[in-house]
Amino acid sequence: MDKQLTTVNNPVNEELTEEEALYEHYRTTVDGGQSALRIDKYLSNRMEKKSRSKIQNAAKAGCLLVNGKAVKANYKVRPLDEISIVLPTPPQQYTLEPEDLSLDIHYEDEEVIVLHKPPNLVVHPGCGNYTGTLVHGLLYHFQNLPTSKKGIEAEARPGLVHRIDKNTSGLLVVAKTEFAMTHLAKQFFDHTVIRRYVALVWGDVKEDEGTITGNIARHKRFRKIMDVYPPEENYGKHAITHYKVLQRFGYVTLVECRLETGRTHQIRVHFQHMGHPLFNDIDYGGDRIVKGTVFTKYKQFITNCFALLPRHALHARILGFVHPTTGKDMYFESAIPDDIQAVLDKWMRYTS
């Protein structure tokens, strides 16, 4: 087949300032139950594609800070330490080259593709992810995918009208024609697309059904995550998440979420704001024991669950939209993936 090559610059996150875009900032607060651990090891376990040697070099250059002061790579982290690191990521040229990646396609016609995205797959190229993304696979299997915008960012996102996080699994629709992209983009803009997720969250969610509202924007201190802000602050974008409890396990709850808006990390940050972070969500505090007992047996049980599900427990299960040309209602459902189901089965046995 013919190769479709597109050379683009490093896409710049439009939410960063020009100065911030030249560097990669990582900020985190150490969990209250964290034991003493070398900071280079602590960070290498949490920062994707960042080796200990790169973190050690940052420490030598005075770019590794704890509570605002530079530290060495052998510094032992303490509970509630505030860590920040700055790593140079100069603008670079890279080639967006098709890659023969396996795609799990649920439906395809002349206008649209509906596929299942597995966890640990980035949807489109960006900082630190220049190969192996879903877009690279789409370019290999499909020719002349449309773009919704002009310029560098659009060239890196052919066919995409929405996306889901790297470690979220589930359904995505991709446009094959410019008309389909325009039609689908309008449906997403009008919030008429049906999107339902299943999530396992910490704690016993009080109400059987409810709605979470709150503006979502970049965290004012920790720029790699999002936060919820009250409407009166006039900061961030309005976000609405409806939820329904599917099953209760005492210390965790399985919920179905229906998105009315589609903000970055919306479900993850909304439930964290409620005090129910997603199970094993490293960015929003779910990768530790939030609810439960102090018994060693329980701690081992949670460790085993995390090993079975090495990502946050979120799956885009249902996707519905109006077909761009036929006008028919399209509805797709994806089964709960094996890793989430394995953890649900363990909780069922544990609570029975």
Image: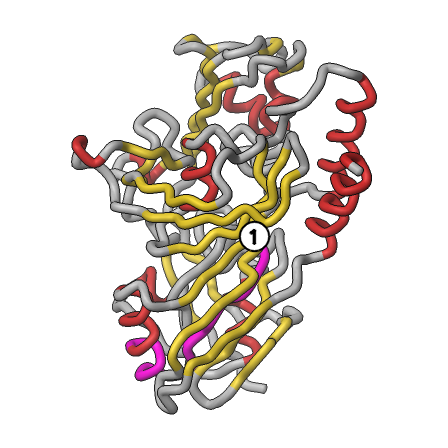
Q: Is residue 24 magenta?
A: no
Q: Position of residue 17 (x, y in %)?
A: 25, 38
Q: Nearer the viewer, residue 58 or 175?
A: 175
Q: Nearer the viewer, residue 114 or 153?
A: 114
Residue at 43% x, 38% y is: 269
Q: Compared with residue 38, is residue 223 higher up or lower down, i.e. above or below?
A: below
Element at label 1? strand
Q: Is residue 176 magenta?
A: yes
Tell me the quadrant of the picture where the N terminus can be found.
bottom right
Please give the range of residues in magenta. 166-182
Q: Compared with residue 163, is residue 246 higher up or lower down, i.e. above or below?
A: above
Q: Position of residue 339 (x, y in %)?
A: 72, 50
Q: Position of residue 312 (x, y in %)?
A: 60, 42
Whether residue 167 appears in this view of the structure is: no
Which residue matches tag 1? Answer: 198
Q: Is 297 positioned to the left or the right of 204 in the image? A: right
Residue at 34% x, 31% y is: 219
Q: Nearer the viewer, residue 101 or 63?
A: 101
Q: Quadrant of residue 148?
A: bottom left
Q: Nearer the viewer, residue 319 or 129?
A: 319
Whether residue 294 appears in this view of the structure is: yes
Disc count in the image?
1
